């Protein structure tokens, strides 16, 4: 009587690896260092927030923000709004009072709205699932993006940096900025210029004491969070910059990590979702990692 053939290793189901296990095993080539001229260091008493600008989507705003940072516009100003499940906002709390407003120096006083841009020419890494806010979603570089095939725009995910405006679509200049700290308000997509995203230090913003209803603006100036400075990384000597790396969103590691989140199979999960939302995909960032 013939004995049954042993099960070959190749026939066994592949062992599930968590997203973190996949990221931990990534090669050095799957990581990149963002350009220093696109990184803002927001220095608070509690630590540093690192923000990456997105000039491919908002070049005019990115240019103005660089000018404002070089000329120390935000130094000594504050985070003057913290609205629960929404945003923190920072800049000049007296900006609407011409007698008290801080000079913007040589920054441009008027910019065009940059809500979206042509999709053509973008290296778009698409997600497999449908989205209620855009026909296609995915990543362009380090940024979460929506698209209708003709136009593309930055999504209002957690950590997104937007340029506050008044009712007119071209009333933002990049001096009054906000960061999304709550559930992703995707209804704002293509209604406000998104200029970048926070890469590191979100815990310093998301834990700020909430301001009063309805919009979280502090009534007492003493409740505001002072900004020590906001500076461009490119303005610092190389040895004083944070050695920060971001996982490439066009890498196999990123694709595998997304799929591991999309179909999580482990001792805790009893049913894999088989779906993932654009704003539920964290961007892996590391500091001072050894080259593998």
Image (tube, grey):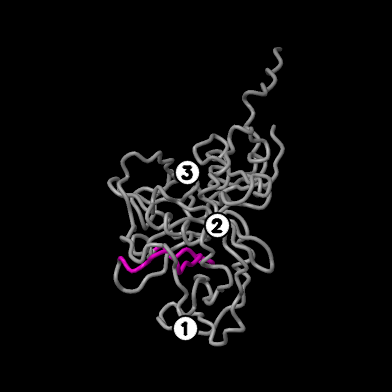
The quadrant in which residue 10 appears is: top right
Give the mark, 3 or 2, whose residue is nearer the N terminus: 3
- Kindly report the distance in space between the C-alpha atoms of the residues bearing marks 3 and 2: 14 Å
Q: Quadrant of the N terminus?
A: top right
The front one of 210 and 19 is 210
- Kindly report the distance in space between the C-alpha atoms of the residues bearing marks 2 and 1: 25 Å
Q: Which mark is residue 214?
A: 1
Over which residues does the magenta segment extend? 170-186
Q: Residues within 10 Å of mark 1 (few under 14, many from 20)?
A: few
Which residue is outermost to the front? 106
Q: Which residue is mark 3?
A: 141
> In the displayed structure, would residue 63 be above or below residue 290?
below
Q: Residue at x 62, y 32 (%)?
A: 13
Give the mark, 1 or 3, whose residue is nearer the N terminus: 3
The quadrant in which residue 198 appears is: bottom right
Q: Which residue is mark 2?
A: 198
Q: Kindly report the secondary structure that dominates the magenta region of the rendered protein.
A: loop
Q: Residues within 10 Å of mark 3 (few under 14, many from 20)?
A: some
User: x, y percentage for residue 163?
Assistant: 42, 65
User: x, y percentage for residue 214?
Assistant: 47, 83
């Amino acid at each position: 009587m013939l004995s049954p053939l042993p099960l070959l290793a190749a026939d066994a189901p592949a062992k599930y690896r968590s997203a973190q296990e996949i990221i931990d095993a990534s090669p050095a080539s799957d990581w990149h260092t963002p350009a220093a001229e696109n990184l803002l260091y927001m220095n608070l008493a509690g630590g540093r927030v690192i923000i990456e600008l997105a000039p491919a989507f908002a070049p005019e705003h990115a240019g103005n923000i660089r000018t404002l940072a070089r000329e120390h516009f935000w130094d000594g100003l504050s985070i003057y709004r913290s609205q629960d499940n929404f945003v923190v906002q920072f800049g000049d709390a007296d900006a609407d009072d011409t007698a008290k407003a801080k000079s913007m120096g040589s920054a441009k006083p008027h910019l065009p709205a940059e809500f979206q841009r042509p999709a053509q020419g973008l290296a778009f890494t698409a997600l497999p699932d449908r989205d209620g806010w855009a026909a296609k979603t995915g990543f362009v570089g380090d940024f979460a993006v929506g698209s209708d095939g003709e136009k593309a725009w930055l999504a209002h995910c957690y950590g997104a940096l937007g340029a506050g405006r008044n009712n007119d679509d071209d009333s933002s200049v990049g001096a009054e900025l906000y960061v999304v700290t709550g559930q992703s308000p995707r209804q704002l997509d293509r209604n406000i210029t998104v200029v970048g995203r926070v890469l590191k230090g979100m815990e310093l913003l998301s834990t700020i004491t909430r301001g009063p209803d309805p919009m979280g603006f502090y009534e007492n100036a003493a409740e505001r969070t002072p900004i020590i400075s906001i500076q461009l990384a490119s303005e610092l000597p190389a040895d004083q910059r944070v050695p920060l790396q971001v996982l490439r969103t066009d890498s196999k590691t990123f694709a595998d990590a997304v799929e591991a989140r999309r179909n999580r199979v482990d001792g805790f999960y009893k049913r894999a979702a088989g779906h993932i939302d654009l704003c539920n995909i964290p961007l892996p960032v590391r500091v001072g990692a050894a080259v593998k």
